């Protein structure tokens, strides 16, 4: 081999060695960049996963809270329905009391609501038809004992039960419905205590 060939070979060897060194450095650098990218991607994935778990937890809490609220509202509606049903049945029972019990109740109500004035009392058509004998006289006596006077009107009023007192053109609604409505909250509370 001639000197020129030796020199060429030496230059080629040095070039190959230099190229191999640069390739090895480039591969090492590429592996380092790849490892950094993997580490960064893993950190970002963990952050995304953590955020997703947090969001899922919050969403689950919202769903649970919403379900609990709907459950409580359904229970409340059911309780209110039961209370209303009990009050309706009590109202119907009072309206449909036997004649003697019903008019005993009317006497007690009148004793409470009659005024010390002259007036008249109005009943439903049903109550006028089933009024016991001598009841009008009893009503007058109750009014007199309170310092007033009452006349039973023969004109029927469209009411379910109870009566309406009229003093000087002013009506006092003493119907069973009006008394129930006026005490509905109190009655509802009482029913709720008994039922629940």
Image: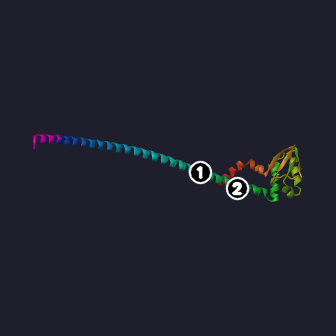
How would you classify the magenta stretch by its main secondary structure? helix
Other-residue count near label 2 (Cα within 10 Å), few / some / many at <14 / 14–19 / ≥20: few
User: Quick one: 41 or 16, which is closer to the camera?
Assistant: 16
Q: Position of residue 95 (x, y in %)?
A: 78, 56
* Bounds of the magenta segment: 1-11
Q: Residue at x 80, y 59 (%)?
A: 98
Is 4 left or right of 194, judged from the image as shown? Answer: left
Q: Which mark is residue 85?
A: 2
Residue, far bottom: 98
Q: Decide: is 44 above or below 191.
A: above
Q: Is residue 26 visible?
A: yes
How much space separates mark 2 and mark 1, taking CA atoms?
Answer: 22 Å
Other-residue count near label 1 (Cα within 10 Å), few / some / many at <14 / 14–19 / ≥20: few
Secondary structure beneath disc 1?
helix
Q: Residue at x 82, y 59 (%)?
A: 99
Residue under label 1: 70
Q: Residue at x 70, y 55 (%)?
A: 86
Q: Which dot, 2 or 1, sits closer to the camera?
A: 1
Secondary structure beneath disc 2?
helix
| Mark closer to the chain start, 2 or 1 | 1
Q: Is residue 146 visible?
A: no
Tell whether position 7 is magenta: yes
User: Quick one: 92 or 3, which is closer to the camera?
Assistant: 3
Is 4 left or right of 75, judged from the image as shown? Answer: left
Circle 2/circle 1 CB separation < 8 Å: no
Q: Decide: is 128 above or below 52.
A: below
User: Quick one: 133 or 127, which is closer to the camera?
Assistant: 127
């Amino acid at each position: 081999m001639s000197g020129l060939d030796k020199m060429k070979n030496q230059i080629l060897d040095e070039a190959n060695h230099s190229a191999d060194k640069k390739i090895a450095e480039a591969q090492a650098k590429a592996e380092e960049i790849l490892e950094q990218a993997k580490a960064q991607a893993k950190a970002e994935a963990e952050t995304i996963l953590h955020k997703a778990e947090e969001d899922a937890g919050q969403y689950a809490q919202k769903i649970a809270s919403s379900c609990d609220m709907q459950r409580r509202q359904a229970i409340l509606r059911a309780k209110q329905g039961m209370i209303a049903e009990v009050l309706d049945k009590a109202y119907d029972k009072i309206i449909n009391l036997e004649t003697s019990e019903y008019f005993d109740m009317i006497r007690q109500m009148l004793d409470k609501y009659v005024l010390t004035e002259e007036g008249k009392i109005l009943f439903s058509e049903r109550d006028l038809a089933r009024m016991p004998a001598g009841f009008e006289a009893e009503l007058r006596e109750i009014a007199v004992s309170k310092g007033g006077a009452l006349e039973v009107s023969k004109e029927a009023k469209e009411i379910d039960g109870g009566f309406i007192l009229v003093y000087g053109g002013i009506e006092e609604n003493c119907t069973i419905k009006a008394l129930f409505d006026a005490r509905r909250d109190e009655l509802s509370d009482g029913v709720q205590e008994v039922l629940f």
